[in-house]
C-alpha cells in the first residue's frame, strides 16, 4: 500500500513540475514579445522623424542633396529594421501561443491526475476498510 501511495505522490510531483516548467518557458517569451513591440514602436518613431527631416531637406533645395541621399538610406535601413522587428515579434507571439497551449495541456493533465489521485485514495480507503472488516470476521 505504501508503494501505491508513493506512486501517487510521484504523479502529483511530476504534474506540478511540468506546470512549473511551462510557466518558466512562458516568461522569456512574454519578455521577448514586449521587447519586440517596444523596438518596433521606437523604430516607427525614428522612421517618422527621419521622414519629416527628409521633407524638410527637400524644401531647402539642391544644396542638401547629399544629406538627402544619406537620410533616404537611413530611412530604408530603419524600415527594414522595423520589418525585421515585426517579423521577430510575430515569431515570438507564435511561440508564445504554442507555450500557452502547452501550459493548458499541462493544466488539463494535472486536473486529470488529481481526479485519478482522488479515485485511487478512495479505492485505497475502501480496500483498507474491507481488510479491517475481513480481519474482524473470524475465519471458520
Image (cartoon, rainbow, N blue to C red):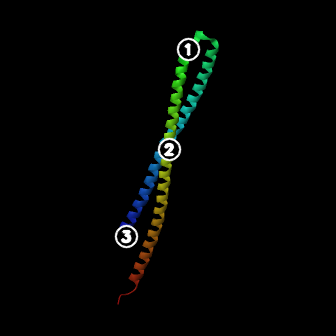
Q: In which quarter of the image is the N terminus?
A: bottom left
Secondary structure beneath dot 1 equals helix
View extreme (front): residue:
62
Query: Residue 24, image x and y in percent?
Result: 46, 46
Residue 35 visible within the image: no
Within 10 Å of the Cα at label 1, are there few (<14), some (14-19), or many (20+) other Cα atoms? Answer: some
CA distance separating discs 3 and 1:
83 Å
- What residue is disc 1 on? 67
- What residue is disc 2 on? 94
Secondary structure beneath dot 3 equals loop
The residue lying toward the viewer, choosing from 46 and 126, is 46
Q: Quadrant of the C terminus?
A: bottom left
Nearer the observer: mark 3 or 1; the answer is 1
Nearer the observer: mark 1 or 2; the answer is 1
Residue 66 visible within the image: yes
The residue lying toward the viewer, choosing from 92 and 20, is 92
Query: Residue 87, image x and y in percent?
Result: 50, 36
Within 10 Å of the Cα at label 3, are there few (<14), some (14-19), or many (20+) other Cα atoms? Answer: few
Give above or below for 136 relative to 110. Answer: below
Q: Residue at x 49, y 45 (%)?
A: 26
Query: Residue 60, image x and y in percent?
Result: 63, 12
Give above or below for 11 relative to 58. Answer: below
Query: Residue 65, image x and y in percent?
Result: 57, 12
Q: Residue at x 46, y 46 (%)?
A: 25
Residue 81 relative to residue 48: left or right: left
CA distance separating discs 2 and 3:
46 Å
Q: Residue 1 carries which label?
A: 3
Amino acid at each position: 500500500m505504501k508503494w501505491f501511495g508513493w506512486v501517487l505522490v510521484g504523479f502529483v510531483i511530476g504534474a506540478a513540475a511540468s506546470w512549473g516548467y511551462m510557466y518558466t518557458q512562458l516568461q522569456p517569451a512574454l519578455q521577448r514579445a514586449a521587447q519586440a513591440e517596444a523596438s518596433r514602436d521606437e523604430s516607427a518613431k525614428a522612421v517618422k522623424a527621419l521622414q519629416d527631416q527628409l521633407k524638410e531637406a527637400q524644401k531647402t533645395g539642391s544644396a542638401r542633396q547629399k544629406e538627402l541621399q544619406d537620410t533616404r538610406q537611413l530611412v530604408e535601413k530603419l524600415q527594414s529594421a522595423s520589418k525585421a522587428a515585426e517579423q521577430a515579434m510575430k515569431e515570438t507571439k507564435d511561440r508564445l501561443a504554442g507555450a500557452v497551449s502547452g501550459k493548458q495541456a499541462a493544466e488539463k493533465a494535472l486536473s486529470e491526475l488529481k481526479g485519478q489521485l482522488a479515485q485511487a485514495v478512495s479505492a485505497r480507503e475502501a480496500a483498507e476498510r474491507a481488510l479491517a472488516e475481513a480481519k474482524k470476521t473470524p475465519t471458520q
